[in-house]
Structure formats: structure tokens, C-alpha cells
Amino acid sequence: MYHISSGCSVVQRSVRYLAHESPAAIFILTVAVSVNAIALGQASTLPNGVACSNVRQTSAVLWAHSTAVGCTTFEHSHSADFSTVGGHEVVAVIDPNKPVKVEIAGLIPATQYYYRFTDAQNNTAYGEFRTPSTVGMTVGLHFGASGDWQQPPPFPSLSNVAVSNLDFFIKLGDSIYADSESPALPGIHQARTLEHFRIKHNENLSWRFGLNIMASLHASTSILATIDDHEIVDNFAGGTAPGQSQDAPDVHPLEPPLFTEAVDFVNETQVYKDAMRAFQEYHPITNELWNVPDDPRMHQKPKFYYKAAYASDAAVLLLDTRSFRDAPLPPVHDPFDSNEVATFVASTLTPGRTILGRAQMENLKSSLLEVQCTGITWKFVVVPEPIQNFGIINAEYRFEGYAAERTELLKFIHDSSINNVVFIAGDFHGTIVNNLAYQELPADPCSAYELTSTPVNAFEVVTGPVAFFDSLLGPSIVKLASDAGVLSPFLKAFYDSLPVRVDTDSITNDKDDFIKALVDAQLEPLAYDPIGLNSNLSAADGLIDAELIQGDYLACHTYGWAEFEIEADTQDLLITVYGIHAYSESDLLSDPNSVLKQDPRIVSQFTVHPKRTQIGDFDADKDVDLEDYTVFASSWLVESGQPSWNPKADMAYPQDDMIDMLDLSVLAQNWLACVE
């Protein structure tokens, strides 16, 4: 069925139907138009190309940015040559600074689609995407992720993404740096208006040095996207009052504050609204709002939470950790002062402090349980910034600074036997992989070093940056450690003398292994697990079955992205991190050829074997039988909070905090089932 938006005439489509032409002629025309669009470069009316997102089994959102005012057309087809057109949408460009997008429906699962956008000046851009298969089959999955676009384009660290045949690519936040000067806004250190934010987004999706790598990436696959802090300003907390959040003067002391209105929350200020509007405009995502009337910090605010299933291979759960978080705790000034450390750790476990907002937390827990109950193997939770343990320094801004909510989430995963959970994060400007554990206070809350730590069947991949020279993870950790007195001048000089080298050992003869040893030294006093998935504390042994293939579980001196590939039959997860040598903006300007000719290379690669489980297998012997029924029966009609409560027996989705006929039905459905 064809749909026409109001205000546009059918005859104003910029590319007429080609169904009467031969497929060969159409294909030649398609190639010619594409080459012409590339040749036009920055002079084209399509500076950012096309993109698509929110691709589900039967629907998708298509997006394009044209600077030509007038009517435009989106068309989609099963054929690369558009020999048959499956549908089209016509939409008007009214403001040349505002992209347009349409939602299409009636798509077929497990199908390759091609789409094209033609604007009012007959310029055309092309893209493609695949709809996921339905739940109930395993067909494999292949996607990528990265974050932190601090420097201006063209982003050679992503140059191999478009040829990687991905199902989708996740943008982990910091898609712009609104609090940094860039060529598109010279002399402006902090974006403040809708116009400023739009210019920033347009800049990072535009041509430079004859390249538009982001446009190529967007055209090659669908994307998922969420925000982090630099879409507005470093470390902002949207769920606190103006004056309690980090603000522009914390980044640039001479800048006036951004959040000045007399409102209850930062997410009610005009600058937040303008920044989020620009983010939504420049990404092919639906504009949804939270409907939580009893929670004023969330009600009618932008909803970036997103859930999608990809056959029974995986589900992706996308979070917003910025818009609703409480103000950070005061930092630890002396990491050697055990009393100060103990007080800080105890404060992080104060109940009620949030980084997600209550409704988003409940959505996440419900979604995790749902996908586990439907038999989906891998659960990817996208958090813009890390959830793994890193210790005390700068913890106030991370999930660790909101440890009560962090513990609630990880404990829920553990208690509900939700397996194969992978958190994917950016923000740290480097790659660090580690298994996860949650902490609880001891009987004596002043004894920080006696925290109870419980490992879970989950790990995290922190990856990126796309480009951020000034805060690359390795040098940043060294600076933080030096400033805190943890690293002596002698060791700092030793680090500076080391090369950047890819290897699988932990010998401190290269910069990455030095950083690994430095981070592990901060984790050890708190009894946190060391970096990596193989050298674990005894309590975590066997929870994650991983094999390191190339490089190490830490790579923090390169720019790049992470590739995730699930094998259809075994469901093994292969994770490959690609990187290029870090470069500054001055390096790019002085010798662009040397920077742009870099090919991303493998800096880390490992395989993780999934933990196979069977719903109803309470005794973990890989089948559901009388022994499991005995365990289940011991909690019959027990409600949450009662002495015999067993959360694993509350199997029916959604959970109702009672063991009843609904749960018995789930047990019956899985009776005598087993894991091979």
C-alpha cells in the first residue's frame, strides 16, 4: 500500500517509478546516481546521506537529511535495482536544518530490504537493512558498537564497518561533544541552543577530506542509538535540580551555567529539551515519551529505552543512564584514607538513589526476565557508561556511585537465573572487558573492605572511542593515578617509555599491560575481580566460559569499535575489537593522508560459550524431572518475602511474586526437557 503525507502531490516524487525500465538499466542508473552523490560531496543537498533504525520483524524507521525545501520520497524494495517497489512515503522538508523520517510497516521478517530517498532537487541516496527473524529459531547475529565522537570527522576508525555486513550498529552515546569547540562552531566551547546542537550533529555526519564514513556506515545497515552526557555537557545529571548537576562551568570555568531555570529537574530545562530534540531529529528513532504520572522526574520526558529481539539468538535492551539520575556523591579525595573510602562505599549503597529512574529499571528487569523465559540465548544490555567495578577513583559518576541500584539489577539477574547477559558500554574511550559482581554491605557498614561480593553470569565489554585524543583511556588512567598519588613519577616515566603492542600476555612490557596492572592494583584491595574473563577470583571461576584468541581483554590506546557475532548452531559469541592508531586533530590537519589511510586492525578477539540452561531445572542437572518438582513444590503458594520464597520458581511472565498455577504451567511445559 502507498501512503502520501499531506502537503505533497503524488506527481512531485523526485524519482519516478522505474518499474517499466529493465533491471539492468535501473541498476546502472542507481550506480550512476550514487557516484554522482559521492562526487557532489559537501555541495550535495544530502550532506548526511540516509539511515534507518528501530528495525523490527515487520517495521522500520527511515531517515534522511536534505537541505532542499520541498517534497521528498522514501521508497523501499526487496531488490537492489528497485525492479519492484514495495512501498513509498512522501514527506515535506520545511526546514533545511531538520532531517525527515518516516515509519514503514508491513515488512516481512528475515528479509533484506533496500531503500532510497529522493529530495526536491532530484538528488538520491540509497541504503539497506535486514529485518530480524522471528523468535523460535536461531540463525546467528552480527552487529557492531562504539561511542564517543569527540573529534570532527571523517572517523577512519569506523572505515571497515560498512563492508562488514552487519545486522545493525549501536551508537553508545556521545555522538557529539556539545561541550567542545569544533570547526562547525568556531569559538564556541559550549552548545546552548537548538541551532547549535543541530550544527554539531550535522557536522559529525558530514563530508570532510572527501570522505563521509558515517554516511557509508548508516547506508550499510540499521542503527540503534542512545545518549550519554556530551550530547549536552560532561557528567550532567538529568534527574536532579539545576545547581546540583555538573554544568558548563565545570568544564569551562569562564562559561555561564546552562541549567538556570527555576524547575525541579535538569531534564525540564530548555537546553535539555533542545539537546534531546536535536538528538532525536538527527537519528532515525521514534519520538517516544515516558508515561509515569506518579514520577515527575520521568513523566512525559524523552524515552530512549528500547527493546528488540533478533530471533532466539539475542535481545538488545537499550538504556538511558543520563536523563533521570540523581546528583553524584562527593568524590573520594584521598584513596589511601580507609575511613573516607568506607564512608563513600557505604553511601553508594544508600537505598533509593537512582541512575536509571524507577520505571526504566522495572522495564529492564521485566524485559530481561521475559527474554530469558522465551528461550533467547544472549541478552545485550546497552549502557552508555560502564557498570563493571573499577574502584574508588571517579566512581561517583559511574554505576558504582549508584551501587544500591547496581546491586539491585545484578542481584536480580543472579536470583532469576538469567544467563548470558552482556553489558555493552562506551564513555571510557578504550576497551576493557570484565565479568560482573554485585556488592552488599557487611554487618558493620563502616568496613568497606568487608563488602560481600557475589559474581553473576554476566560480563561487560567497554569499547571505543571513535575519536577522542585528549581523553584516551590509557593516558587518562595514568593521569588520574598520578594526580591521586597512586602512581609515582618513576612509574609514570616508565609508562611513557613503553610501546603500544598487541599481545595476549600480561607482562608489563607495553602500555596496555601496564594499564591492566594499574587497574588490577586498584581492584584488589576491594576484592573486585581482575580485568579479563579468564583470570578470576575463585568465586567467579566457571561462570564465564571464554577463550582469548588475539590481543588482550584491555586495549586502551587506539580508536575503534567492537564487533559481536553469534554462531547460529553453537550460539558461541565471537567478539572482535578493531583499532587504529590514535591521532589528534592537529595530526589530521597536518598530514591527513597518513591518518586516513589507516585500516582498522584486530586489537582484541575472544570467544564466549553460552551457558545452556533449561527453564525449571532447579537442581542444575540439565533436565526437568521429579527432583525439580520437589524443589518447586516446597514453594507452592508462597509469596515474595515469606520464609520459603524461591524467586527461581516464579517462572511465569510477567512475574507476580507468588508461586501458583501460572508457574506450574511453565514447569509442565518444560517437563522432561533437557539441555544437550
Image (cartoon, rainbow, N blue to C red):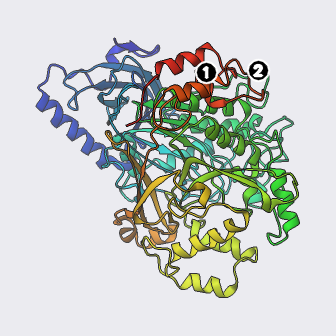
Mark 2 nearby-residue class (10 Å; few <14, some 14–19, many ≥20): few
Residue at the bottom extreme, as displayed: 490
Of callouts 1 and 2, the N-terminal one: 2
Left or right: 109, with 173 as reference point = left
Measured along the vertical axis of the image, is residue 399 above or below residue 583?
Answer: above
Residue at 62 percent of width and 31 percent of height: 648
Residue type at tag 1: Pro
**Quadrant including the C terminus:** top left
Along the line of sight, the residue nearer the viewer: 245 or 440 = 440
**Secondary structure state at the residue bearing disc 2:** loop
Along the line of sight, the residue nearer the viewer: 345 or 181 = 345
Left or right: 195, with 377 as reference point = right
Left or right: 573, with 339 as reference point = left
User: Would residue 302 be seen by someone viewing this image from the given angle?
Assistant: no
Mark 2 sits on what residue?
293
Residue 567: which quarter of the image? top left
From the top left corner, tell me how far across and down residue 204 is, in percent: 50, 50
**Quadrant including the N terminus:** top left
Residue 359: which quarter of the image? top right
From the top left corner, tell me how far across and down residue 588 is, in percent: 45, 68
Left or right: 116, with 323 as reference point = left
Which is in the foreground here, disc 1 or disc 2? 1
